[in-house]
Amino acid sequence: MSGVDKTKRIGRWYFGGTASAMAACCTHPLDLLKVHLQTQQGGKITLLQMAAKVVKNDGILGLYNGLSASVCRQLTYSMTRFAIYETVKKELTRDGRNMPFYEKVGLAAFAGASGGFVGTPADLINVRMQNDVKLPKSERRNYKHAIDGLYKVVRFEGPLKAFSGATMASTRAVLVTVGQLACYDQLKNLLLKSGFFGDNLYLHLTSSTLAGMIATLLTQPLDVMKTRMMNAPPGYYKSIMACAVDISKNGPIGFFKGFVPAFVRLGPHTVLTFVFFEQIRLNFGDDPA
């Protein structure tokens, strides 16, 4: 066993979901602040001002409201997309075959759509639990944890309500997964072939940072349109296409407003997910046959 090259170890289907859940524990405050900023009605407040407001009203632990739902989301959404991507990739490369990039993109898109759909109920609970502290006490849902939230939604609002927003969630998940999984894989292979990197932490940090930037670029137009439609007066936009046309009047750059704050949230989660994933794979993965 001492002669086994650990860098060749193969990840198991649940490694990605576990790594994503670990990353979520680290980046949850950023996700919570993003939800608070997106759901505020009127007025402009910065990320730091929102953080100070949450800490003032609910203490430092207020930044971790809804953590159980965030972890539950990763154990459904990310577990599904990583499981599909890694399992199929392992089969397609079993005989030493190299997957072309277009196959990685197609596989990541399918995995992302599946994960987005499966993770929608947990995502719904995640948003509600994070935003609960902003509501008057009489209007708060007061879910004890993610499972309690899911149970109450299904019981009192019906099973279909749990999948409210599934189309938007799946569409975004496709873009995120292509940016994260497919691009991370491709970048990692290209950097290894360059001869400047070994299969180590520096490679994983570089590849995941670039993948996080690409994922943010891919999802930013959709996020901008979603936010614009959420904040528009009723009936202002007849369709998402009308919203896109309105934004395009400011040129292509209009679709990428808020890129830096978006990357500040998605980037660290992407980096931590793959750093944890690679470390779990190196230490607990299966040795190649």
Image: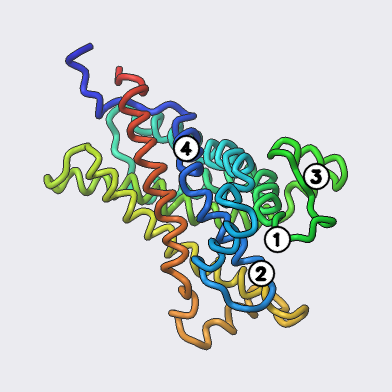
Image disc number at residue 134? 1
What kind of residue is marked 4? Met
Question: Which residue is labeled 3 in the image?
Answer: 153
Badge 4 crowding class, 10 Å Cα cut-off, few under 14, some 14 to 19, many 20 or more, is some
Query: Please, what secondary structure does the residue beneath circle 3 have?
Result: helix
Q: Is residue 252 above or below residue 216?
A: below
What kind of residue is marked 3? Val
Depth check, front residue: 137 or 207: 137
What kind of residue is marked 1? Lys
Lower position in the chain sequence, tag 1 or tag 3? 1
Question: Which residue is labeled 4 in the image?
Answer: 22
Which dot, 2 or 3, sits closer to the camera? 2
Question: Which residue is labeled 2 in the image?
Answer: 40
Badge 1 crowding class, 10 Å Cα cut-off, few under 14, some 14 to 19, many 20 or more, is some
Lower position in the chain sequence, tag 4 or tag 1? 4
Image x and y of residue 100, in percent: 32, 46
Image x and y of residue 121, in percent: 69, 45
